[in-house]
Image (cartoon, helix red, strand yellow):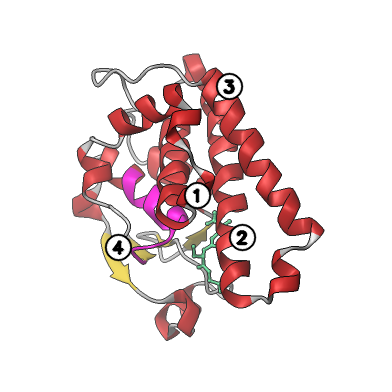
Amino acid sequence: MRLFLNKTSPYARMARIVMLEKGLVDQVELCWCDPWSDDEQLLRENPAGRIPTLVTDNGTALSESILIAMFLNDQQLNPALIPDSTKEQVLYLAGLGQGLMDASFTTVISRKYLNEEANNSILSQRRGRAIHRILDRLESCIDGYAEAEQITLGDISVAVALEYLIFRLPELYLGNKYPGLEAWRSGITQRASFLHTVFA
Ligand SMILES: N[C@@H](CCC(=O)N[C@@H](CS)C(=O)NCC(=O)O)C(=O)O
């Protein structure tokens, strides 16, 4: 398999962490690229020109981080990132994580590419409020981190979204306002899969 990625995309980082947690490193070649400069190889595989893109051994180009994560999870039984016994909770958390990622990423991209007016638009304000609501919700529902516990796709999605927020919009993440979440984040991001994939 081949995974197209860069070092700043939260979506690509999520796919890479799933790959590492599943022990699939030897089966996935990393194809570093810049999706914003119309990378030819990437466009040949994925007309949307977005990362992550995973080209399977059959030559099928998969897109959308969550679909890629589910595909990689299915490549082998263990460790199960979406255990049957906790599936609903895992998908719930993964949804919150993807929501946080989307709201944060869209904010970053519109600050980069759009003008001041667009950045103060109703849509942009809605995204800001969504970020705060999701953080509040996570603070009230995230459990403590225990290293021995099996990590899930929900954990990965939420932790990557928080890392991205801290990387790009640190003023929106005040760890002291979310002490439970912050303790959880600082524990889970000590895993090798997170340490090997820090944003750069
Ligand atoms: N919903 C997609 C979002 C992917 C995405 O927006 N990737 C960005 C990088 S973080 C990208 O490749 N952007 C290039 C572009 O939109 O042209 C996913 O979950 O994979």
Closer to viewer: mark 4 or mark 3: 4
First in sequence, mark 4 or 3: give its number.
3
Closer to viewer: mark 4 or mark 1: 1
Mark 2: amino acid: Thr
Mark drawn on residue 171: 1
Closer to viewer: mark 2 or mark 3: 2
Q: Which residue is mark 3?
A: 88
First in sequence, mark 4 or 1: give its number.
1
Distance between mark 1 and mark 2 Cα atoms? 16 Å
Mark 3: amino acid: Glu
Mark drawn on residue 200: 4
Is 13 part of what is drawn in magenta? Answer: yes
From the viewer's perspective, is residue 139 above or below residue 120?
Answer: above
Q: Secondary structure at mark 2?
A: helix
Mark drawn on residue 106: 2
Mark 4: amino acid: Ala
